[in-house]
Structures are given as structure tokens and as C-alpha cells.
């Protein structure tokens, strides 16, 4: 039931992206390339390559007996001054020694694709919806050398809000920070904490997902962005 709900949410987001894109094409701002001062101003229609952006987040952490490495690269498109949309790829590795007893090892990989939509009611604040489907692979090596492994997958619907620093009309390069929650609460999601797993008293708690990263505008011209006039 949750998987069907997540798929329905994905189609809803894609339809909203298409509607927003159509609105942007009909109401596209007149822009000029900063490299082309003095040339005739062009009222651009349809797909605009300078609205593309990349970027994402990275994770690097070390602690006693363990480490966490992760990356969330993305490719997005600025639909208009109020909406961004795009795709994201998740990857995270966690390694831990002495997980349960001395000299045992646990390795975990999380990976999967996703799509997102951000709405900016004001230039520096946004609401975000992100649909993901992640796979989690665990490998446990016990003290005696026996290895057990498992793979789980789960769909997630991340909802939340964030702050953008430097998002301006005509530009797509800025820093951002967001706070998201996986409202589907699938027990196999990497964004939940399961207590009393597999028992009658099992409970799935939401875990806040805090991400900070950067948008990097593509095809922005000499001065880093196209300028509106």
C-alpha cells in the first residue's frame, strides 16, 4: 500500500513539474548572456540550458571504530522563479568495527535514485518534496570469520523545508540547507529508526534528514549567471 502511495506521489510531482514548466515557457523572462553585452535582447522560449544546475551534498565522518562516506549528486532545472525540479542519486557507506563484540565488522551500503521538487514562496526559503527508492546492503563478519549479508529496499517520500542563500532571479548558483522527514515510515528506509525490530512492539520513528549543499549553475556566462532586465 505504501509503495503504491509513493508511486502515486511520484506521478503527482512529475505532473506538477510539467505544469510548472509549461507556465515558465509562456511567461519566460527576457534574459541576456553576460558575454553578449550590446547584442539584441532575446525573449527566450522553451527549454533554456542556462536554467540547468548541478551540485549536491557530501558526507565524511570518522569516529572511534567507524566511518561514514556519502554523496548526493543532483541535476536540476529551474522551471521559473518559484520552482526547481531535478533528479538525485544517493550513495552512503558505513563501516564499523567492534559492532557487537570485539573484532567483528559491519559494512553497509545505501544507494538509489530520486526526484525532487522545490517551491520558493520567497527567494531564500523553500518547501521540498522528494521521492526516492533506496537499496540497503549489509555485510556482517563475526569474530569467527562467518559472514552474513542481506539486501533491503524501500520507497521514501521526504517532505520538509529549507533555506537558500543567494538564489536570485536569473541565477541558479547558491548554498542551501534543508530539513526533511520520510513520512512513509517504511521499516527498511534509511531515514527511520526501528525499535524492537520484528517483535509485536515494533515501532518506526522518524529521523530528521539534515542536508547542506550547493547548487552550481550551468551555462551561466562570464559572470556566473544570466541577467534579467
Image (cartoon, rainbow, N blue to C red):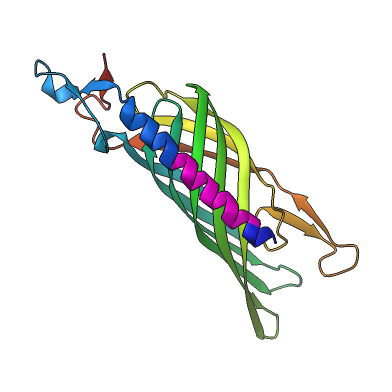
Magenta stretch containing residue 15, yes or no?
yes
- The image quadrant that residue 30 belongs to is top left
Q: Is residue 115 visible?
A: yes
Residue at point 12% right, 23% down?
A: 36
Where is residue 65? Give x, y as percent.
64, 61
Q: Nearer the viewer, residue 10 or 137?
A: 10
- The image quadrant that residue 78 belongs to is top left
Q: What is the residue that sits farthest to the left in this orientation? A: 39
- The image quadrant that residue 204 belongs to is bottom right
Height in image: 161 above or below 106? above
Residue at point 64% right, 55% down?
A: 5
Pick the quarter of the image with the C terminus.
Answer: top left
- Classify residue 109 as left or right of residue 104: left
Q: Magenta part mainly helix, strand or loop?
A: helix
Where is residue 10? Give x, y as percent.
54, 51
Q: What is the residue that sits farthest to the right in this orientation? A: 201
Q: Nearer the viewer, residue 95 or 126?
A: 126
Height in image: 75 above or below 112? above
Residue at point 57% right, 57% down?
A: 7
Magenta stretch containing residue 227, yes or no?
no
Where is residue 29? Give x, y as percent.
30, 22
Pick the quarter of the image with the N terminus.
Answer: bottom right
Residues drawn in magenta: 5-17
Q: Nearer the viewer, residue 59 or 136?
A: 136
Where is residue 14? Give x, y as percent.
47, 47
Residue at point 31% right, 34% down?
A: 51
Q: Is residue 79 visible?
A: no
Amino acid at each position: 500500500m505504501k509503495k503504491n502511495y509513493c508511486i502515486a506521489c511520484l506521478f503527482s510531482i512529475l505532473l506538477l513539474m510539467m505544469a510548472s514548466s509549461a507556465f515558465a515557457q509562456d511567461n519566460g523572462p527576457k534574459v541576456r548572456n553576460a558575454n553578449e553585452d550590446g547584442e539584441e535582447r532575446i525573449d527566450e522560449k522553451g527549454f533554456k540550458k542556462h536554467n540547468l544546475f548541478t551540485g549536491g551534498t557530501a558526507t565524511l565522518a570518522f569516529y572511534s571504530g567507524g566511518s561514514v562516506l556519502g554523496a548526493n549528486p543532483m541535476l536540476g532545472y529551474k522551471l521559473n522563479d518559484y520552482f526547481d525540479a531535478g533528479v538525485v542519486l544517493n550513495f552512503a557507506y558505513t563501516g564499523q568495527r567492534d559492532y557487537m563484540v570485539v573484532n567483528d565488522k559491519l559494512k553497509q551500503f545505501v544507494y538509489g535514485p530520486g526526484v525532487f521538487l522545490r517551491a520558493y514562496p520567497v527567494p531564500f526559503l523553500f518547501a521540498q518534496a522528494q521521492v526516492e527508492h533506496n537499496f540497503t546492503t549489509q555485510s556482517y563478519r563475526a569474530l569467527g570469520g562467518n559472514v552474513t549479508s542481506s539486501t533491503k529496499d524501500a520507497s521514501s517520500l521526504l517532505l520538509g523545508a529549507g533555506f537558500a542563500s543567494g538564489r536570485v532571479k536569473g541565477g541558479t548558483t547558491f548554498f542551501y540547507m534543508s530539513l526533511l522527514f520520510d513520512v512513509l515510515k517504511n521499516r527498511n528506509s534509511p531515514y527511520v529508526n526501528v525499535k524492537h525490530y520484528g517483535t509485536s512492539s515494533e515501532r518506526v520513528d522518524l529521523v530528521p534528514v539534515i542536508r547542506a549543499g550547493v547548487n552550481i549553475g550551468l551555462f551561466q556566462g562570464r559572470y556566473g549567471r544570466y541577467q534579467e532586465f
